[in-house]
């Protein structure tokens, strides 16, 4: 099955395809923007979306989430269904993505804990407007330039309460990844964690505000075990992945660079 919504030269086509019990959303190309298993529509089907949940290792009880980019609504649905006490506000630039997500990907109607708005997420950032900021906006495999500028990441830091986390999804072959990571590090004073997703070609970057300088491995492993029981996601594997791209020693994961490294 494939449904194509052609929208003229200035707006990318929307395509919804279906294969082996999984429905996919494509925006402007063949890349999969979102996926939903038809027999479990509120689960996180794509590996990178599951990996983005690693923010819970550092901020286990978020209260107000601002999400820039809806796609098929996988993360918004998961937040709404599984994270108690969290209000999620989603900004999606393309109104047809919202229509498609609600019609074909079982994104629920707005209620006291979920609101989805057509608008520019870049312009929505305001000081201390959230304690969880999720950025996952693409057209095909390209991130809009306004969402990777230094000004955007600076505004993201100001948008977060303390403690708070920024979670950003990048493709691992993005030629500007190092530049973008350095911009996040500048905005967050070096308090940034990154790791390669387990299977998908994505890198999850987590910016931290109001955190200790380090977290002990035994604390992280205990949190991971508890979170795995709560959410059914492989948090212990995320902890081990943190050793690949971040600063650490035998006892701790270092969250804030020491003075000599800044």
Image (tube, helix red, strand yellow):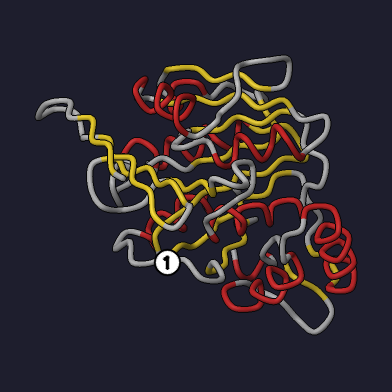
Q: Is residue 24 left or right of residue 63?
A: left
Which residue was labeled with disc 1? 201
Please state the total of marks drawn on the protein image. Answer: 1
Residue found 27% across the figure and 37% down from its top: 3
- Residue, far bottom: 250
* Left or right placement of residue 105 versus residue 120 in this view: right
Q: Position of residue 242 (x, y in %)?
A: 66, 71
Residue ID at (59%, 78%): 244
Q: Nearer the viewer, residue 17 or 54?
A: 17
Q: Nearer the viewer, residue 183 or 230?
A: 230
Expressed as whole percent of the image width and height from the top left, the position of residue 1 reads: 31, 45
Could you say which is closer to the camera, residue 48 or residue 145? 48
Position of 198 relative to 99 (above/below): below
Please say if 261 is above or below 47: below
Q: In the structure shown, which secondary structural element does the residue marked by tag 1 occupy? A: loop
Left or right of 214 in this view: 205: left
Which quadrant holds the C terminus?
bottom right
Residue occupying the far left of the picture:
9
Which residue is located at x 44 percent, y 58 percent? 20
Residue found at x 49% / y 34%? 105
- Pinpoint residue 53: horizontal percent, then vertical percent: 66, 52
| Residue 207 image offset from top left, x and y in percent | 61, 50
Above or below: residue 128 compared with residue 145: above
Callout 1: 10 Å neighbours few (<14), some, many (20+)? few
């Amino acid at each position: 099955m494939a449904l194509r919504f052609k929208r003229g030269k200035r707006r990318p086509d929307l395509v919804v395809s279906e294969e082996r019990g999984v429905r996919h959303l494509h925006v402007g190309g063949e890349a999969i923007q979102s996926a939903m298993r038809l027999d479990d529509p509120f689960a996180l089907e794509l590996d990178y979306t599951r990996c983005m949940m690693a923010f819970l290792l550092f901020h286990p009880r978020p209260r107000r989430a601002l999400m820039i980019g809806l796609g098929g609504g996988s993360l918004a649905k998961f937040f709404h269904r599984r994270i108690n006490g969290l209000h999620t506000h989603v900004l999606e630039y393309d109104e047809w993505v919202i229509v498609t997500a609600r019609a074909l990907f079982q994104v629920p109607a707005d209620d006291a804990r979920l609101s989805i708005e057509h608008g520019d997420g870049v312009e929505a950032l305001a000081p201390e407007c959230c304690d969880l900021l999720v950025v996952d906006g693409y057209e095909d495999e390209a991130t809009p330039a306004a969402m990777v500028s230094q000004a955007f990441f600076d505004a993201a830091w100001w948008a977060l309460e303390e403690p708070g986390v920024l979670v950003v999804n990048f493709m691992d072959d993005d030629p500007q990844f190092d530049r973008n990571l350095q911009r996040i590090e500048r905005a967050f004073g070096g308090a940034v964690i990154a790791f390669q997703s387990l299977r998908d070609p994505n890198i999850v970057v987590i910016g931290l505000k109001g955190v200790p300088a380090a977290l002990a491995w035994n604390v992280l492993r205990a949190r991971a075990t508890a979170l795995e029981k709560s959410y059914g996601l492989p948090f212990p594997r995320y902890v081990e992945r943190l050793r690949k791209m971040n600063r650490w020693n035998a006892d701790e994961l270092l969250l804030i660079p020491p003075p000599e490294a800044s």
